[in-house]
């Protein structure tokens, strides 16, 4: 049935609260005895943030994995899963961006199904697991990509350079803690580019063929917040109010992930990541304006809403989004992110069979359609 909205089993979102305070409250509420931490390597090795959490947990802390690799290669996921299984914790606290959060989603499946090898993990790729997780996570996101709100995880098969989908009924975090202060450690390029990833969620959700009544108001409100808050952070990286507003803009739109299809910006973007190792945020910076331009003849009215929400009613949606990306000092072309014309044929070949590319509102029927979009992004 298409007219169905599925609520992900996320218990609560806590906002504008210091991480240590929120963790202490949630550990007590959930009656947790053993805590395992998965964190970004930067936060663990170059700041004192993880040590502060460990000290605060005291004897409840049982282990740390801080070696998550970008795009979550299957081998790295298994490495993390095996570490978690050694310690049998009650919950995982994940601190970092989309990579550790995605890694732990797939780790939850490994933990619950007794998977401890890449070959076993491959067997459940692209197959939804209707199970109750034996372990959940509390996520403290430090970027703005929004994966913490969905039951969709991704991990990359490095042999074929393709990111595969892993889903389960409850692999989203049980709790999300939005602490704008901890995000001050996030590099500016990563904070701002992952925000464009969420702009992409809002734009492609709005432009999809979905009749979901929640998408238009949430997408447009999200875009309004992003249009002002991201420029505020770019001018003053210590503007905590702007950081908080951006986190809330992500929350607004990302909670609908999985309830509305994405399009070619996301689908081609996945391939830029797996084939060319382009960070997710940068894939949206490069692809979203191009896909909007290619789709314009199909959904011109909806695209006017996007330009209005970004405060640029006299521009096309493609121009308004491109202007925002320029204002944030982010890359805008395939060449800037390392994708050469020699990659195009492989991207087009994979893209033609990619389900997310195929859900684009303007039908993509042949390789040349994808090549045309890539030309617009070059």
Image (cartoon, grey):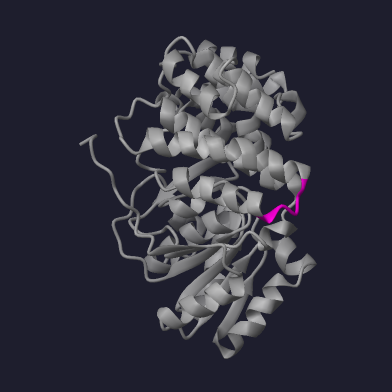
Which residue is at a point 45% across and 13% down the rendered structure image?
A: 300
Which residue is at a point 38% across and 43% down the rendered structure image?
A: 258
- The total of numbered circles placed on residues is 0
Which residue is at a point 47% across and 23% down the rendered structure image?
A: 305
Question: Residue 356: x, y in percent?
Answer: 44, 31
Which corner quadrant holds the N terminus? top left
Horizontal side of residue 76 vs 254, given as left or right: right
Residue farthest to the bottom, as pictured: 59
Question: Residue 294: x, y in percent?
Answer: 53, 14
Which is more toward the observer, 45 or 68? 45
Which is more toward the observer, 123 or 257? 257
Which is more toward the observer, 110 or 330? 330
Question: Residue 119: x, y in percent?
Answer: 47, 54
Residue 201 appears anywhere in the view: yes
Reply yes or no: does residue 237 show up in magenta.
yes
Residue 72 appears anywhere in the view: no
Question: Residue 94: x, y in percent?
Answer: 56, 65
> What span is in magenta?
236-240
Which is more toward the observer, 375 or 97? 97
| Displayed quadrant of residue 62 | bottom right
Predominant SS of the magenta segment? loop
Horizontal side of residue 204 vs 70, given as left or right: left
Check the image and report above or below for 375 versus 22.
Answer: above
Reply yes or no: does residue 13 show up in magenta.
no
| Displayed quadrant of residue 280 | top right
Check the image and report above or below for 348 versus 63.
Answer: above
Which residue is at a point 66% across and 29% down the rendered structure image?
A: 324
Which corner quadrant holds the C terminus? top right
């Amino acid at each position: 049935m298409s007219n169905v909205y599925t609520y992900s089993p996320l218990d609560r979102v806590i906002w504008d609260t210091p991480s240590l305070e929120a963790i202490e409250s949630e550990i007590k509420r959930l009656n947790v005895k053993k805590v395992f931490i998965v964190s970004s390597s930067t936060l663990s090795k170059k700041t004192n943030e993880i040590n502060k959490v460990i000290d605060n947990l005291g004897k409840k802390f049982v282990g740390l994995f801080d070696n998550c690799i970008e795009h979550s290669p299957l081998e790295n996921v298994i490495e993390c899963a095996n570490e978690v299984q050694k310690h049998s914790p009650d919950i995982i606290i994940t601190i970092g961006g989309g990579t550790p959060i995605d890694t732990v989603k797939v780790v939850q499946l490994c933990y619950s199904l007794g998977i401890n090898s890449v070959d076993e993990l491959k067997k459940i790729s692209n197959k939804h697991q209707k199970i109750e997780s034996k372990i959940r996570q509390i996520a403290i996101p430090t970027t703005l990509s929004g994966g913490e709100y969905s039951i969709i995880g991704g991990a990359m098969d490095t042999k074929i350079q393709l990111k595969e989908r892993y889903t389960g009924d409850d692999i989203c975090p049980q709790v999300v803690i939005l602490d704008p202060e901890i995000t001050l450690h996030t590099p500016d390029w990563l904070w701002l580019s992952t925000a464009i990833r969420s702009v992409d969620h809002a734009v492609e959700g709005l432009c999809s063929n979905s009749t979901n009544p929640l998408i238009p108001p949430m997408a447009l409100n999200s875009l309004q917040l992003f249009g002002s808050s991201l420029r505020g952070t770019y001018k003053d990286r210590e503007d905590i109010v702007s950081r908080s507003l951006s986190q809330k803009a992500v929350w607004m739109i990302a909670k609908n992930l999985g309830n509305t299809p994405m399009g070619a910006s996301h689908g081609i973007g996945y391939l830029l990541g797996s084939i060319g190792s382009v960070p997710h945020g940068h894939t949206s910076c490069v692809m979203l304006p191009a896909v909007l331009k290619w789709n314009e003849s199909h959904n011109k009215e909806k695209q006017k809403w996007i330009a209005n929400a970004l405060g640029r009613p006299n521009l096309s949606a493609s121009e308004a989004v491109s202007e925002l990306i320029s204002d944030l000092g982010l890359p805008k072309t395939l060449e800037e992110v390392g994708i050469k014309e020699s990659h195009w044929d492989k991207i087009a070949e994979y893209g033609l069979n990619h389900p997310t590319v195929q859900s684009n509102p303007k039908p993509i029927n042949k390789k040349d359609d994808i090549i045309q979009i890539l030309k617009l992004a070059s």
